[in-house]
Amino acid sequence: MKPFRSLKLHQIFVAAALLLMCQPALADKRVALVIGNSAYRNVAQLQNPVNDGAVIAATLKQAGFDVVDSRHDLPAADTRRALRDFADQARDADIAVVYYAGHGMEVDGSNYLIPVDAKLERDTDVYDEAFSLDRVLLAIEPAKRLRLVILDACRDNPFTKSMKRTLASRAIGQGLPKIAPTTPNMLIAYAAQAGSTAADGDSRNSPFATALSRHLTTPGLDVRRAFGFVRDEVLKTTSNRQEPFVYGSLGGEDVPLVPARATPPAAASNSQPGPNPQAEARRDYELALQVGNKDALNAFIAQYQDGFYANLARIQLAKIAAEETRLAATEKARLAEQERVRLAAEGAQKAQQLKAEADAKAAERARVAAEQAKQVAQDKAAEAERKRVATETRANDKGPEIIVATDNPGPTSADTSQGDKAPQADKASQADKGSQAGKTVNVAALSAGPPPAEVTKSVQAELRRVGCLTGAADGEWNTASQRSLSLFNRHAGTKLDAKVASLDTLDAIKLKPSRVCPLVCEHGFKADGERCSKITCAEGSFLNDDNECEKRRANKPVAKRDADDRRERQRPVRVRPQLLPEAGVARPRASAGGSGQIVCDGTGCRPVRSGCHIDYQGGSPRNGTGGNEEVCN
């Protein structure tokens, strides 16, 4: 009996041990606060934030979060209370998440979330009526393993248009500014890159919220890779107009919001006979992709000459080669155009000018062809990466599986580089393999090309250089920027699309070595080289409406004197009495008109007519003695 009893006890112990092994480890406590503000009382209401908050709350609840506090349309008092209550929930949590959808704004480099009852009549009201992002970070600070804030608040803010500025130097920006978290294990995710705005989309939910609901809670997926997938999907949905960004850093270990599904040992032994043969190739490929140059990719192909990831590496090489060709063609076209302009300005011989013009046109055609080839290679690489991500995601959901190369892209321009056979493997990459195996790859860095906001700023800077834009290069492609590009088209003879700022537009403007749009000065100033100089008119001249100096008319004061003379001649003659010595009677003397003399006879006295005088005939005009005959010439 004893051996049987001992065997039975042993079986019970083994069964209990297996049950303990199948049970998941003590689960992390995960809490979340979700706020969606749509019904703003003092500006137009938003369409999607409440819907976005609802879908994110449902996603987190399905993922097994211990606490999901979902609120919507919160005024300031309720927001303050919600943050205070959530801080208590996060005190003993391992993972704390705050998702906010609604209006936000930047004031003097700080982020503020705007409750629905805010008025914000002046810029200083933001300190009293809105909530600083630091207040949100304070609420999740007690969490031990991960502190995550997701801000879907990069919308175009209507408050800034009506807000009174109390200080001209106070900066009120568009979108939300970049932030560098000072607390460890903290990530802050923006729906759009810092300084740019996000789209609500045409459906019930915004593109950002839709992508979050698909990727954020994937079991076992590191949160950084999840945001990489979100970024890729939003870029695709918005045609590269909106790019989500994540700020902050975590350690080397994976930090998934939802742990990987546990598999019983027996089932694992049946379904996973051995390690995934593609796992090592995938890690090396991701490392080579992070390095991002031809040497790393060539070293990878030298080690893994066949298979799915080798084909992906060749596609990436083709993309790099196409970009190098484009840059060389762009520079050649720029130099050719510069030479053509120089010869025309110096008045070179006609044959030289014609040759330079032909060279410039040929270089421009080569540049356009290289740009098209680069775009094809870039699209092909992006599509290959999307397929890879989808394949790996399915593999994570279904369990380990072997990835085989089903699409052979065929020989590419990068395959010719195989002639310089790279060494067997990059020794440094192999040495780092052990330390890098536990680190995740930031998928947000896999897509080629600069962010759209940076392209816009570069186009605006070039338009300023050629004299077609007077505003600042702020990264916002507004009506003024579109007008400036249309002005460039008119004076440069191009047909660029003024509705968007693209790399093609940037390259076309860079080809112009000097000013394209004429210098336009305000009234009272004239163009003087590359600047406007004030117009100074000479004495006696004035600046007319045509911005030219004009002499004042000389007959204006003469006309005034003639009028005065006419009024003087029309004034009645005043006569003062004067005693005539010889007659003893009063003789009038004219005080105005004629010659100022009078003549008297037996009938009386009268003024001497114009052109006549009195002949005193030996007498004296002083006492009127002698004759006083009027003599006329």
Image (cartoon, grey):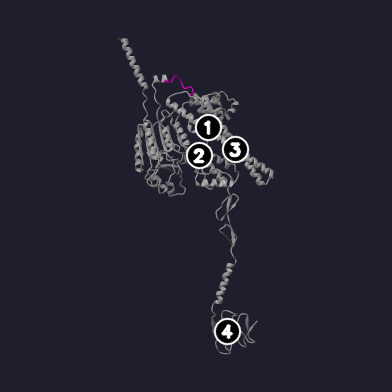
Of the residues shown, which amino acid type is indicated by label 4? Arg
**In front: label 3 or label 4:** 3
**Tag 1 or tag 4, which sits nearer the N-term?**
1
Q: In the rendered structure, which disc, 4 or 2, sits on the residue that comes first in sequence?
A: 2
Residue type indicated by callout 3: Arg
For numbered disc 4, what is the local secondary structure?
Answer: strand
Checking the image for residue 421, the label placed there is none
N-terminal of the two: label 3 or label 1?
A: 3
Relative to 468, 82 lies left or right: left
Above/below status of 404 relative to 235: above
Residue at the disc numbered 2:
452
Marks 2 and 1, the one that precedes in the sequence: 1
Circle 4 residues within 10 Å: few <14, some 14–19, many ≥20: some
Disc 1 marks which residue?
A: 380
Magenta range is 271-279
Helix, strand or loop under label 1: helix
